[in-house]
Image (tube, rainbow, N blue to C red):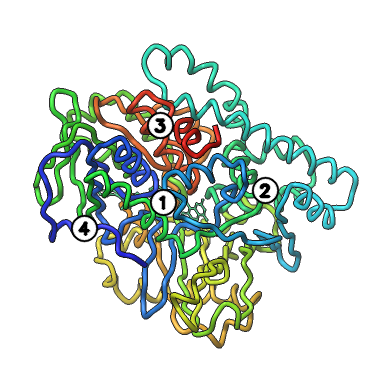
């Protein structure tokens, strides 16, 4: 792992920049690198001690874990826009490893349903479990609906880069087709296709990828995730730290800098224009442009000074969009390799016997002793062919489940690592429940577990500043897609947003947000320019 950036306190930092980016998530890094390509000196300020946002990795006791990257779709396909954009932003330095024939294993009680790579194989895999002709037709219809929604997404997101009269006139036409898919819940669309609730439970078995069960999520969001993985999953070779490692050199080559331990307290606004940022030590750094990758709620609700905030016309509408769910993540270190333990590449999605995800979530939200509504298990050491070179004799596993923020809020004021015995006891009990799920399916790992550590929504808040420890920024319910203000250009001149709240959660979406933001800033179609450079357009 190459160290990216340096600590603010140990750096000599110029007072004035072409652009300042708040936050070093993938959207922030991509925006900074694209501006650097255009000759701009860009300063990236990250509050955490590592660059990368949810793509950062961390180490304990010789083990290494990624945080927010378990698989990425599409990048391996020859004519994939996403693959080409990654080649463009990393100068083809980022390489991917495919996950093979099966990317997700959906498990209800004793029944397992594999999601196979390739649309034909995906359908055939499901038909083995749902052999009825009516179910077969429903699977076909479902796949068609997923493709139709994904196709309509293009102009919806392209509109976000437009502004002025053109944008105003084009918006209704560019948004309309997609809104037909965002305004229905996943449940409504699937229930319109089939009344087989088991099939619906299985088809929505990746709902954890966007954090909302079928009755609450927008179908468009479900469709974008499902389609993203239809052709298989991939993992960045060398781990998720490779995103920052391969993008940062572009920023630095343009005279830019990436600083850690550099929390921004406020966006400085003068005469209605963003002119820089104030750091938490009171120092003001100035820039011709400010780009916030800190999320819409943080940017508009916390970083803008009160006077500028009061002039933002959509504060009430923003307040109505919920933050996404929060989560627990158990980071496990094992003293044997992935090969020795025969760890799979495919992810597990483990559910109770009950196929109704909404009901499972509701039960667990009311009562922590109810069955875990979802347990996701990922095996980065098996996915990454470079893992063993970096960590000989070892492997790691991550287990994730949902966890209501309210359950942890009472420890919010206690400092990290010093939240007291009752907090630690709660964590220990939850860790055991998650480990039990692992041992149920991969019992050979029991003897090899040498270390584990649980992150809670408080950890997520501590490291990322998402105020409710949310996993995916704003919630992906139908209301979110109505919010036209979730776009790069803000009502404050020279202030732009980037990252998952501008598009949606996901590595692909976060990268795309960087291209969208720089398109909005320059008035150029940076996606098309990038594709032309890579020879695809
Ligand atoms: C557990 C988990 C698993 C995931 N798995 C996958 C997956 O397998 N595949 C996939 O495609 N996607 C996955 N995602 C989603 C994906 O990681 C995110 O959607 C994406 O990385 C978000 O990028 P972003 O650009 O919005 O920035 P973020 O990663 O959200 O980063 C924002 C950065 O801003 C910084 N910041 C905030 N406030 C300030 C401030 N005031 N001053 C300075 N810095 C600040 C934060 O510290 C943070 O580093 C996962 C996410 C999580 C949490």
Mark 3 to mark 2 CA distance (whole Å): 27 Å
Marks 3 and 2, the one that precedes in the sequence: 2
Asked if the residue at tag 3 contacts the one at tag 4, i.e. Cβ–Cβ closer than 8 Å, the answer is no
Mark pair 4, 3: CA separation: 27 Å
Nearer to me, 172 or 250: 250
Q: At 18% across and 41% down in the image, what residue appears?
A: 266
**Residue drawn at (60%, 65%), measured in percent from left and top?**
371
Secondary structure at numbered mark 1: loop
Instruction: Give how far across and how far down residue 275 sits, in percent.
Output: 16, 32
Residue closer to the observer: 420 or 497? 497
Instruction: Identify the residue position indicated by label 1 in the image.
Output: 470
Q: Are marks 2 and 1 in contact (CB under 8 Å)?
A: no
- Ligand 1: does it lie within 8 Å of the C-beta at label 4? no
Q: Earlier in the sequence, mark 4 or mark 3?
A: 4
Q: Residues within 10 Å of mark 3 (few under 14, many from 20)?
A: many
Q: Compared with residue 154, is residue 258 higher up or lower down, i.e. above or below?
A: below
Q: Is residue 379 left or right of residue 276?
A: right
**What is the C-alpha distance between the residues marked 1 and 3?**
17 Å
What residue is shown with label 4? 261
What residue does disc 3 label?
Answer: 486
Q: From mark 4 to mark 2, how far is it between C-alphas?
A: 39 Å
Looking at marks 4 and 2 on the same chain, the residue that comes earlier in the sequence is marked by 2
């Amino acid at each position: 792992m190459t160290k990216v950036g340096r600590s603010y306190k140990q750096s000599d930092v110029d007072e004035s920049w072409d652009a300042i980016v708040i936050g070093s998530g993938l959207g922030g890094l991509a925006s900074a690198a694209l501006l650097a390509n255009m000759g701009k000196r860009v300063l990236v300020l990250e509050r955490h001690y590592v660059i990368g946002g949810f793509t950062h990795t961390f180490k304990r006791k010789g083990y290494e874990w990624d945080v927010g990257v378990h698989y990425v779709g599409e990048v391996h396909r020859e004519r994939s826009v996403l693959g080409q954009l990654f080649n463009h932003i990393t100068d083809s330095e980022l390489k991917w490893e495919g996950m093979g024939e099966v990317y997700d294993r959906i498990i209800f009680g004793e029944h397992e349903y594999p999601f196979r790579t390739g649309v034909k194989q995906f359908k055939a895999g499901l038909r083995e479990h749902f052999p009825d002709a009516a179910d077969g037709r429903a699977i076909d219809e479902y796949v068609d609906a997923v493709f139709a929604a994904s196709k309509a997404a293009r102009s919806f997101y392209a509109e976000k880069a437009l502004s002025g009269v053109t944008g105003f006139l084009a918006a209704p036409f560019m948004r309309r087709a997609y809104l037909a898919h965002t305004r229905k819940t996943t449940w409504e669309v699937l229930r319109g296709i089939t009344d087989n609730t088991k099939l619906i439970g299985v088809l929505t078995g990746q709902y954890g990828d966007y954090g909302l069960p079928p009755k609450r999520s927008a179908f468009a969001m479900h469709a974008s995730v499902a389609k993203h993985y239809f052709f298989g999953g991939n993992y960045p070779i060398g781990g998720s730290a490779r995103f920052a490692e391969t993008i940062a050199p572009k920023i630095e080559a343009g005279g830019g800098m990436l600083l850690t331990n550099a929390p921004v307290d406020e966006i400085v606004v003068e005469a209605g224009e963003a002119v820089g940022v104030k750091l938490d030590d009171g120092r003001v750094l100035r820039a011709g442009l400010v780009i916030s990758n800190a999320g819409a709620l943080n940017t508009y609700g916390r970083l803008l000074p009160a006077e500028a905030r009061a002039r933002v016309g959509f504060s009430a509408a923003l307040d109505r969009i919920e933050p996404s769910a929060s989560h627990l993540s158990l980071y496990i270190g094992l003293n044997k390799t992935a090969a020795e333990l025969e760890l799979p590449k495919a992810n597990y999605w483990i559910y109770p016997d009950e196929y109704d995800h909404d009901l499972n979530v509701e039960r667990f939200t009311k009562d922590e002793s109810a069955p875990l509504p979802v347990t996701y298990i990922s095996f980065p050491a098996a996915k990454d062919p470079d893992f063993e070179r970096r960590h000989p004799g070892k492997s790691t596993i991550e287990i994730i489940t949902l966890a209501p923020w309210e359950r942890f809020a009472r420890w919010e004021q206690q400092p990290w690592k010093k939240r007291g015995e009752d907090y630690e006891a709660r964590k220990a009990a939850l860790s055991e429940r998650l480990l039990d799920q692992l041992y149920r399916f991969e019992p050979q790992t029991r003897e090899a577990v040498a270390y584990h550590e649980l992150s809670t929504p408080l950890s997520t808040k501590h490291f990322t500043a998402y105020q409710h420890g949310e996993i995916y920024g704003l919630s992906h319910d139908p209301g979110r897609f109505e919010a036209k203000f979730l776009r790069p250009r803000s009502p404050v001149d020279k202030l732009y947003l980037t990252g998952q709240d501008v598009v949606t959660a996901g590595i692909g979406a976060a990268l795309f947000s960087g291209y969208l933001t720089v398109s909005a800033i320059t008035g150029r179609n940076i996606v098309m320019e990038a594709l032309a450079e890579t020879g695809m357009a």
